[in-house]
Amino acid sequence: MTSSRPQLVPPKLPRMLPVEENRSSAVNKRKKAAHKTDQELMDEMEAAIAGDPLDAPVIQQPMQVTYELPTLQHVLVTGAVALSDVDRFQLNNIFNFGQWLLLARESFNTAKRTGKIVFCSNVFGDWTEQKCKVKKTKAYTPYTFYLLSIKRACLKHLLRLL
């Protein structure tokens, strides 16, 4: 029994012959760059790494349990500037900034309850965005990182006790 499927034959297309074109100087430079030795490439990489590193200012840990809201506002503004560049992300800075955010949230809620602060919204994220220039999403990440780190540390401690 023969196959009933039709055989596919590619259509006949005219062939294109290569045409010599004027090569620009950029193409010639790329060709020269492609022929670098391994040592030249290693030197380029080391020069790129040896450039000025972006020093991240260290966000200090809070020393007290409670702070006034204006003090926390100033710390959050400077902390946001310290974490403004992705190259400056360091786990200790993110952790410490999360601690400051937690203290600020508690202080904000206390000030709202006692009437010490009059703010258009009861949401802490709105306060950080308007007063501290820290977007809600940017404040959420270090805050969550801090809470998860604390929960994990507590869980490890409890497991050691068992």
Image (spheres, grey):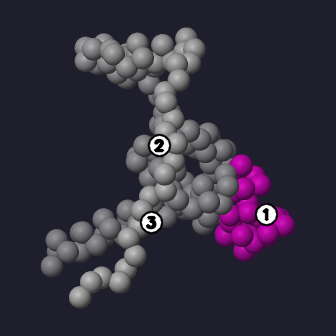
Mark 3 element type: helix
Q: Amino acid at mark 2?
A: Phe
Task: Residue 145: name its quadrant.
Answer: bottom left
User: Which sits earlier in the primary sequence, circle 3 or circle 2?
Assistant: 2
Secondary structure category for the residue under label 2: loop
Q: Earlier in the sequence, mark 3 or mark 1?
A: 1
Q: Secondary structure at mark 1?
A: loop
Specify whether residue 118 is painted magenta.
Answer: yes
Circle 1 crowding by C-alpha within 10 Å: few under 14, some 14–19, many from 20: few
The Cα atoms of the two marked residues, 3 and 1, are separated by 26 Å
Asked whether 90 or 146 is in front, the reply is 90
Camera sees residue 71 = no
Query: 93 and 50: which one is in front?
Result: 50
Q: Which numbered marker is on residue 89?
A: 2
Q: CA distance from mark 3 to mark 2?
A: 18 Å
Residue 37 showing in the rendered view = yes
Q: Closer to the camera: disc 3 or disc 1?
A: 3
| Disc 3 + disc 2, Cβ < 8 Å | no
Say few, some or many: other residues with alpha carbon within 10 Å of mark 2 (under 14 / 14 to 19 / 20 or more). few
The region drawn magenta spans 109-133
Instruction: In the rendered view, tell whether residue 86 sits above or below residue 131.
Output: above
Foreground mark, 1 or 2, reads 2
Distance in Å between CA atoms under marks 1 and 2 = 32 Å
Q: Which residue is mark 3?
A: 147
Quadrant showing the N terminus: bottom left
Q: Could you tell me residue 101's position as x and y percent?
A: 57, 57
Q: Is 127 left, or right, of 6 in this rendering?
A: right
Q: Is residue 75 above or below residue 156?
A: above
Asked whether 113 or 144 is in front, the reply is: 144
**Identity of the amino acid at label 3?**
Leu
